[in-house]
Image (cartoon, rainbow, N blue to C red):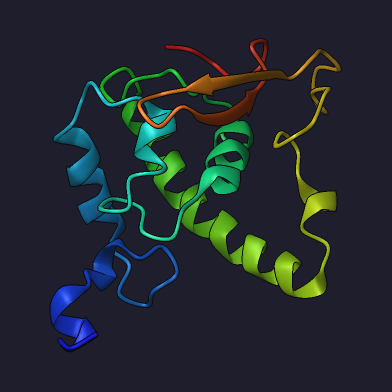
Amino acid sequence: MEADPDTVYDWSADIMSDSWDAKAAGKKLKAQPAMLLCDALLDQDIFAGSGNIIKNEVLYRVKLHPLNTVAALPAKKLSELIKETRNYAFDFLEWKKEFTLKKHWLAHTRKTCTRCNLPIIKDYLGKTNRRTFYCENCQVLY
């Protein structure tokens, strides 16, 4: 890279950076009210560093259906989603270093919901068509 990374990269969007700005993430999300959550969590301009596993696990943790739009969420749930995305990233890193990541997955590649004991749905959703694992019973679609 020829340019200084600090002039090119938006550290405030990096979910693991000390410069992470949750309020900025909220503003970026609210500016795209029709965006699906399954797409929002993969948008690197909003959640740099988030990937498919993080998407699935965060949505499961906060009990949100991946086909919710940003606009459909109550403010409290939107805030919870933003906060949990950062929290899960640090859990992810710790478990990856311990080589225990897969054993902590609650939704990603799972067949059964740990809360409801019902089947986990596997589908290819959003504009990215990435694998998405979710429970239709306990992940709320607003």
Counting the numbered discs, the total is 0
Write down the quadrant of residue 42 in the picture: top left
Query: Which residue is nearer to you in this view: 104 or 138?
Result: 104
Question: To which quarter of the image does residue 135 belong?
Answer: top right
| Residue located 74% across and 75% down the image | 97
Q: Is residue 52 found left or right of 38 in the rendered image?
A: right
Q: Position of residue 99 (x, y in %)?
A: 82, 68
The vertical placement of 23 against 40, above or below, is below
Residue 106: % across, % down: 75, 38
Is residue 89 rendered to the left or right of residue 21? right
Pick whichever, 42 or 138, lies toward us: 42
The quarter holding residue 117 reads: top right
Q: Which residue does the image show at 27% across and 26% down from the upper left? A: 35
Q: Is residue 65 among what the camera can see?
A: no
Percent x, y for residue 83?
Answer: 45, 51
Looking at the picture, how far across and down is residue 107, in whole percent?
Answer: 71, 33
Quadrant containing the C terminus in the rendered view: top left
- Residue at the far front: name it: 2
Viewed as shown, does residue 86 lie left or right of 60?
left
Residue 13, above or below 138 = below
Q: Left or right? Give the position of 81 relative to 72.
A: right
Q: Quarter holding the N terminus?
A: bottom left
Point 43% across, 60% down: residue: 49
**Point 18% across, 88% down: residue:** 2
